[in-house]
Image (spheres, helix red, strand yellow):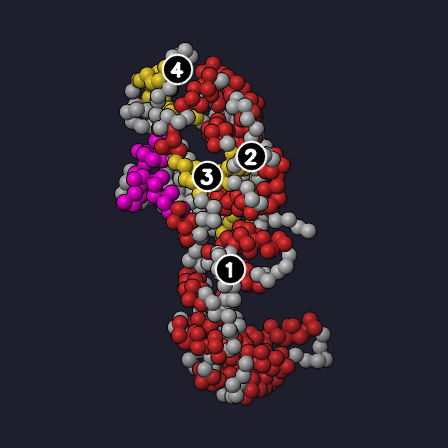
């Protein structure tokens, strides 16, 4: 019996921590740009493990940390040009102006954008505690941890350096005696272009100077402008939040990557065992290349919700193991995704049942009109809802739950990503193409036109088409070739191109006065 990956990971947590009063599942992202669908896997992987633990009767706490006290490294490509964002490089994200009004900072804008997407996806079966790291650091909550890390800085230096190769840049350029595992934001210019001049171990007083010319002394017991470097910050927060599980991406889980380094620091510096984890694969969008928040090359959950209904989005993340990479797509693949989603809901397999348990909203109804059917019928009806419903009823489509929602999604997909699939019949008979056909092909067209004089169902038309196309004297492979050839003929006569909508549905649902004259003179 195949166990769902969320249950498998939850069992690993329980094996490592068998008697905890509460299990904290952690997730986090740096708001360097719009949180794209690849980043969303960071959240959803942890969230589904939390759901599995909750279903096992455990007390679960789900936290999501916004690493907004990180430095602003580069200007995203999609940022507006009327603000000089280059002037903010080196400042915390919370000090970078918002690209749009009514937000406190760029961090606030991107955070709220993602939070709204979570609301649309109804990821609220478990309350998610949002932790804003800029506020946490500035509150003084971590000051004792900062002092502890600074006092053990040489040990930290040795741990980090043990994972570096001779080609690696970074901390190994700094001498051991000069190393500090912290970033200091200047009290005057706000940037991290600072250099530590001296530090008093007894008083915790530290003196720094900034490239802007500022020279200042601060007390690490009360300072609000100091942050631990990432590979120290991460394990520090594992201890601070008592984290039991936190998934991370391939970049963190690579050999010598930040998770491996943080694990050593957790054990040797902070005296804790690292949480359970899993490496999740990257998500792609066909034809879009790799996604990065700061590059502007990304698709957010909100953007995908224009074409993927929320439960389908949840379904795909539940279906694939975190270790498996997969793609969303705005081509025909989306029709397959909808068909898989609609078709699997009655499965009795435990794995698939768990997938739907994670994906579906409460009190949801799964008898829905097929997305592929809508992409055929809606254009025929000129995207008129009432006419589309009339055609669907005429062709005996009974499952119309979610019709209005899927109609809007299908319309958006066709008009935005697949306008070539909005097929329109020719206005005149295609005489030149008809003249190029042989007698047998013309006779098939005549038979089809004659058959369609009477109202027929989609199934009847499908059976008739194959009866006039197939030749019993030919092999299966040869008949398949004939079918391809004849469907090309039908589409050229009707639409003037080699492909078209689902033909049986089109011929069964469309007014015969619109196409009969196009089949044969």
* Of the two numbered discs 2 and 4 in the rendering, the one whose residue sits closer to the viewer: 2
N-terminal label among 1 and 2: 2
* Residue 197 can be seen in this image: no
- The CA span between labels 1 and 2 is 42 Å
N-terminal label among 4 and 1: 4
* Of the two numbered discs 3 and 2 in the rendering, the one whose residue sits closer to the viewer: 2
* Residue 240 can be seen in this image: yes
Count residues near mark 2 (Cα–Cα under 10 Å), then give few for <14, some for 14-19, many for 20+. few
Count residues near mark 3 (Cα–Cα under 10 Å), then give few for <14, some for 14-19, many for 20+. many
Query: Which dot marks residue 63?
Result: 3
In this rendered view, identify the residue nearer to me: 290 or 348.
348
* Of the two numbered discs 4 and 1 in the rendering, the one whose residue sits closer to the viewer: 4
- The CA span between labels 1 and 3 is 32 Å
Determine which quarter of the picture holds residue 264: top right
Q: Is residue 339 above or below residue 203?
A: below
N-terminal label among 1 and 3: 3
* Of the two numbered discs 1 and 2 in the rendering, the one whose residue sits closer to the viewer: 2
N-terminal label among 3 and 4: 3
Determine which quarter of the picture holds residue 292: top left
Left/right placement of residue 63 relative to residue 267 reads left
Q: In the rendered image, which residue does mark 4 sit on?
A: 204
- The CA span between labels 3 and 4 is 31 Å
Label 2: state its secondary structure. loop
Left/right placement of residue 53 relative to residue 142 reads right
Residue drawn where x is 48% and y is 23% of the image:
171
Q: In the rendered image, which residue does mark 1 sit on?
A: 334
N-terminal label among 3 and 2: 2
Q: Residue 475: horizontal and vertical position, in percent?
A: 72, 74
Start and end of the magenta stretch?
Answer: 87-114
Q: In the rendered image, which residue does mark 2 sit on?
A: 20
- The CA span between labels 3 and 2 is 17 Å
């Amino acid at each position: 019996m195949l166990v769902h990956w969320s249950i498998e990971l939850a069992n690993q947590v329980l094996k490592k921590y068998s008697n905890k009063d509460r299990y904290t599942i952690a997730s986090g992202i740096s708001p360097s740009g719009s949180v794209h669908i690849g980043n969303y896997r960071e959240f959803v992987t942890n969230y589904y493990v939390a759901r599995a633990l909750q279903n096992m009767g455990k007390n679960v706490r789900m936290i999501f940390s916004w690493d907004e006290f990180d430095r602003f490294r580069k200007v995203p490509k999609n940022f507006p040009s009327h603000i000089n964002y280059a002037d903010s490089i080196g400042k915390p994200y919370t000090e970078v102006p918002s690209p749009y009004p009514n937000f406190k900072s760029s961090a606030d804008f991107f955070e709220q954008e993602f939070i709204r997407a979570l609301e649309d996806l109804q990821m609220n079966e478990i309350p998610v505690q949002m932790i804003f790291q800029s506020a946490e650091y500035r509150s003084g909550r971590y000051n004792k941890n900062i002092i502890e890390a600074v006092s053990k800085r040489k040990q930290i230096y040795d741990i980090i350096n043990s994972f570096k190769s001779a080609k690696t840049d970074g901390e190994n350029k700094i001498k051991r005696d000069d190393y500090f595992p912290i970033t200091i934001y200047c009290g005057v210019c706000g940037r991290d272009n600072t250099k530590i001049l001296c530090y008093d171990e007894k008083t915790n007083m530290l003196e720094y100077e900034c490239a802007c010319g500022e020279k200042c002394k601060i007390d690490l017991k009360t300072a609000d402008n100091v942050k631990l470097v990432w590979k120290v910050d991460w394990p520090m927060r594992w201890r601070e939040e008592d984290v039991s599980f936190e998934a991370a991406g391939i970049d963190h889980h690579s050999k010598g990557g930040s998770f491996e380094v943080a694990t050593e620091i957790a054990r040797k510096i902070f005296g804790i065992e690292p949480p359970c984890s899993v490496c999740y694969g990257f998500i792609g969008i066909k034809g879009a290349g790799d996604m990065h928040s700061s590059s502007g090359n990304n698709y957010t959950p909100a953007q995908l919700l224009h074409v993927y209904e929320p439960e389908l989005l949840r379904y795909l993340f539940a279906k694939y193991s975190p270790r498996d990479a997969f793609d969303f797509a705005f081509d025909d693949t989306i029709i397959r995704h909808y068909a898989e989603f609609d078709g699997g809901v009655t499965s009795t397999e435990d794995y698939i049942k768990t997938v739907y348990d994670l994906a579906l909203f409460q009190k949801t109804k799964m008898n829905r009109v097929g997305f592929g059917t809508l992409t055929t019928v809606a254009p025929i009806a000129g995207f008129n809802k009432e006419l589309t419903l009339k055609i669907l009823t005429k062709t005996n489509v009974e499952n119309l739950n979610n019709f209005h929602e899927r109609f809007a999604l299908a319309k958006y997909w066709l008009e935005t990503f697949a306008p070539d699939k909005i097929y329109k019949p020719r206005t005149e008979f295609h005489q030149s193409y008809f003249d190029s056909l042989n007698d047998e092909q013309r006779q098939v067209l005549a038979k089809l036109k004659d058959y369609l004089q009477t109202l027929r169902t989609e199934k009847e038309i499908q059976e008739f088409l194959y009866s006039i196309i197939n030749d019993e004297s030919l092999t299966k492979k040869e008949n398949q070739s004939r079918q391809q050839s004849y469907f090309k003929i039908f589409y050229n006569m009707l639409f003037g191109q080699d492909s078209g909508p689902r033909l049986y549905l089109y011929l069964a649902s469309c007014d015969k006065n619109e196409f009969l004259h196009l089949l044969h003179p």
